[in-house]
Amino acid sequence: MKITVIGTGYVGLVTGACLAEMGNHVVCLDLDARRIASLNQGQLPIHEPGLLDVVLRNARAGRLEFTTDTDHAVAHGLLQFIAVGTPPSEDGSADLQHVLAAARAIAERMAGYKLIVNKSTVPVGTADRVRDTVAGVLAARGLAADFTVVSNPEFLKEGSAVQDFMRPDRVIVGSEDHRATELMRAVYAPFMRNRDRLVLMDVRSAEFTKYAANAMLATRISFMNELALLAETLGADIEHVRTGIGMDPRIGTHFLYAGTGYGGSCFPKDVRALIKTAQDAGQAFHILPAVQAVNERQKQVLVDKICARFGPDLSGRRFALWGLAFKPGTDDMREAPSLAIIERLLALGAEVVAYDPQAMDQARQALGPRAGLSFAVLADAALTGADALVIATEWKEFRSPDFAHLAATLHERVVFDGRNLFEPAELQAAGLEYHAIGRGTASAPPFDTAHAQR
Ligand SMILES: NC(=O)C1=CN([C@@H]2O[C@H](COP(=O)(O)OP(=O)(O)OC[C@H]3O[C@@H](n4cnc5c(N)ncnc54)[C@H](O)[C@@H]3O)[C@@H](O)[C@H]2O)C=CC1
Ligand SMILES: O=C(O)[C@H]1O[C@H](OP(=O)(O)OP(=O)(O)OC[C@H]2O[C@@H](n3ccc(=O)[nH]c3=O)[C@H](O)[C@@H]2O)[C@H](O)[C@@H](O)[C@@H]1O
């Protein structure tokens, strides 16, 4: 099938590459000329495991093309996927300017039938606005061209985006038109040969499903973070509690990890947008503001522990910080909890030497040049001269450090672990002081490492 994808960010690029992998002819359009130039030179603008191979293979096979030429892109695809950003506006609502601009770009050029597939995360009612926008432009052109707008929200996670797209839990299609539904079924059929996971529903429900999913996941995280705080006060260990509740299939094991709060480009903005949607609909949403408030507080928990240990004035103290990206497997720094941690440590007079396997360039851009902040080229190099180690992101390479070496290197022999990566007894045995999230005193001995592993 001939497919156009508008937007080559995390979602557009993965969508385009994976659709090409299934034999479709895909043209990816972006307005960012630098991004398209680097893609045409075989370089990815983002770090996403496995994506480069898929992009290169399909580009070489002539099934995947990158362009800034909107005429060409719109003429190419029977299906036009919109995968542009929907950042938060001042009032928290999703800013639809890029989505509507993409809709206009299609309408200004289309001649025959187009199926417009909205993949961006957008509030309920956006498909109607896209439809009105396209119809308005076509009317002004004096055309009565045929088109349909469907909703197809994306659920991929950064760091495992290719795998998530290739083997989706479910594909949500909001469509009220038979021809569009059949086209969507045909596009997704190769991704679900063993089990049909395409869930068809009306357009508004599909748009709402995306926000419901992200809000539910954010709620689980804040709930666990709040439990972690209480566990600590009570002398319980949230890691044992997590395992204990996660084995109940009604609860499940995923997204129960206490930490330094959720970040990224989506949970914070989508929670905000859903609160605004509810407000606009005249309904107070009681749970989500609490989810947000807990998350904001959680970003401070690790520095609170540092201040409890070293006092509120951290001048003269140096901290090694491992992990900058908002989660492992990505270079994305959008709303990363590490930003809040670094800002506060610097404000309290501390020196921070940070290391991340992928996100250091992005972090430099996000933070700008700052007195007291530097970056180390290796995790080990960040430790030199540090009083303590702070862990903000659970990259795999941080999971098995040489504890004896840490104890010999860190002046104060203290580890502040915002991701609960270790068994406290192991650090204690190496002579390290260990502060984690919600782990109280009931930490040793480890009960069942198979379940305690993430
Ligand atoms: N990042 C993620 O993991 C996920 C994001 N989403 C949603 O997908 C949407 C896209 O997100 P990302 O890929 O992260 O965005 P992004 O910000 O990484 O990329 C968006 C791209 O669209 C381009 N663009 C903007 N307007 C354009 C136009 N009119 N024509 C052509 N290109 C245009 C930009 O230059 C940029 O390269 C958002 O609504 C987001 O909420 C959904 C699931 C996962
Ligand atoms: O709409 C989106 O953009 C995407 O948002 C999230 O994906 P993503 O933001 O890439 O990453 P997650 O793995 O969900 O992590 C989000 C944040 O929650 C934190 N988190 C996650 C899980 C957990 O148990 N605890 C926890 O603190 C992570 O550290 C990270 O900061 C959703 O998981 C995707 O399904 C969705 O498509």
Image (cartoon, rainbow, N blue to C red):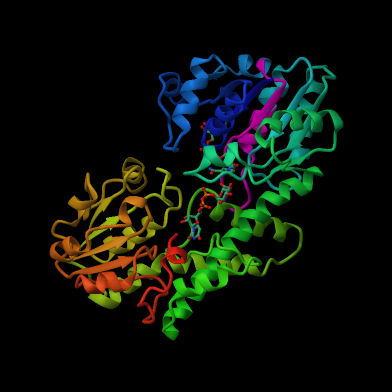
Q: Which residues are magenta?
A: 76-103
Pick out the residue farthest to the bottom: 234
* Magenta stretch holds residue 446: no
* Total marks placed: 0
* Magenta stretch holds residue 86: yes
Point out residue 171 in the picture as x, y percentages from the top left corner. Answer: 69, 42
Left or right: 172, with 260 as reference point = right
- For image coordinates 54% across by 40% down, the residue present is 163
Residue 277 vs 247, above or below: the answer is above
Residue 185 vs 285, above or below: the answer is above
- For image coordinates 31% across by 46% down, the residue present is 368
Image quadrant for the N terminus? top right
- For image coordinates 46% across by 22% down, the residue present is 56
Point out residue 304 in the picture as x, y percentages from the top left corner. Answer: 34, 73
Residue 151 vs 115, above or below: the answer is below
Nearest the viewer among 447 and 199 is 447
Nearest the viewer among 413 and 260 is 413
Left or right: 131, with 295 as reference point = right
The answer to whether residue 311 shows anywhere in this view is no
- For image coordinates 40% across by 25% down, the residue present is 43
Image quadrant for the C terminus? bottom left
Nearest the viewer among 108 and 169 is 169
Left or right: 331, with 203 as reference point = left
The answer to whether residue 211 shows anywhere in this view is yes
Ligand 1 placement by image quarter:
top right
Point out residue 405 in the picture as x, y percentages from the top left corner. Answer: 16, 60
| Quarter assignment of residue 134 | top right
